[in-house]
Amino acid sequence: MTDRPRPARRRRTPPPPPRGKREQPASRRGDRRLAQLAVSAVLLLAVVVVKITAPSAMDRYRDRLLNLMAGQTDFRAAFSAVGRAVSGQGAVGKALNDAYTAVFGPQDTGGTVPQDAADPAAYTAENTPGDVCLTQQVLGFAYANPLTGPVTDRFGYRQDPNGGGQQFHYGLDIAADEGAVITAFAAGTVTAVGDSAELGNYVTVQHPGGFVTLYAHCSRINASSGQQVRPGDPIAEVGHTGNATGPHLHFELMKDGVYVNPIYYYAAP
């Protein structure tokens, strides 16, 4: 296994996200969610009507609707998810779950990490690393869980389990038994296979649109650099190599070098 040094990541150790700033009356939060749902529902209904009555015009209207929603990533994600459902590009149940997540936020994954660790409202420009994006992005391709299991650590600030104090966690940790199969998140090309003191055995995959996924702490890598993969193809096995306290998958998602929260695209068991 070739050791390919990974670009150094600057660790951030600012004060905890200010909890006081994220508190707001429950009624205001509920009103905002209802407003998001109403606008999303109208736009998504328009998409379905266009799809049924004028399939050839779908792409043109999709672009216009995306422009209307340019200021609200949640709306764009909901549109994308339901668009996959009506176009047959993904399972209807999974697509509708994506739409639910885009409007209401990620569902509880059963992990023990506080919800505010992944909540964009808990962060400000001052305490968010510059290489992090907290809003949901439209992927534009089919994807699947790389591994299904309980989420033991989320994306965001946390107390380093190895005693390093408060640091930003750039991925999602999914627990599983040693040797459990890890599969490709989406279609793409394997770009790196290596090992490091921090990540242990890892593999990265390049996907369309500038997206890259990383799978770390593996006991074994079953893919090779340059290999073409599809969603669900086996690429590695769960382990606890590198700086890990137990067997799990550390999963990262990046868009043009910026880290994105993987929880938006993870279907909890």
Image (cartoon, rainbow, N blue to C red):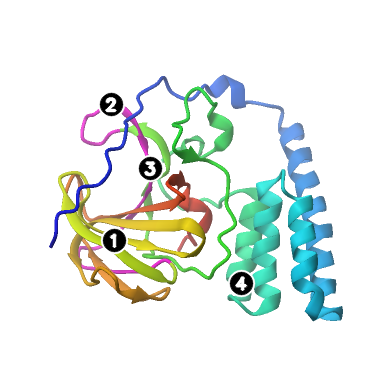
Q: Position of residue 199 (x, y in %)?
A: 22, 49
**Left or right position of 102 against 59:** left
Cα–Cα span, label 2 and label 3: 15 Å
The amino acid type, in three-letter code, at marker 4 is Gly
Distance between the Cα atoms at labels 4 and 3? 28 Å
Precedes in sequence: disc 1 or disc 2: 2
- Give the number of the mark in front: 1 or 2: 2
- Range shown magenta: 160-185
Which amino acid is tagged 1? Ala
Q: Is there CB contact under 8 Å for labels 1 and 4?
A: no
Q: Nearer the viewer, mark 3 or mark 1?
A: 3
> Closer to the observer: label 2 or label 3?
3
Which label was assigned to residue 93? 4
Task: Identify residue for label 3.
Answer: 170
- Label 4 close to label 3 by CB (< 8 Å): no
The secondary structure type at the circle numbered 1 is: loop
Q: Secondary structure at mark 4?
A: helix
- Find out whether the residues at labels 1 and 2 contact each other: C-beta distance under 8 Å: no
Q: Which mark is residue 176?
A: 1
Assess whether mark 2 and mark 4 are in contact (beta carbons under 8 angstroms). no
Q: CA distance from mark 1 to mark 4?
A: 24 Å
Q: What residue did someone put label 2 on?
A: 165
Along the polypeptide, which appears first: circle 2 or circle 3? 2
Q: Is residue 157 above or below residue 209?
A: above
Mark closest to the chain's N terminus, 4 or 2: 4
Q: Position of residue 226 (x, y in %)?
A: 29, 71
Circle 3/circle 1 CB separation < 8 Å: no
CA distance separating discs 4 and 2: 40 Å
Residue at screen point 14% across, 54% down: 3
What kind of element bears circle 2?
A: loop
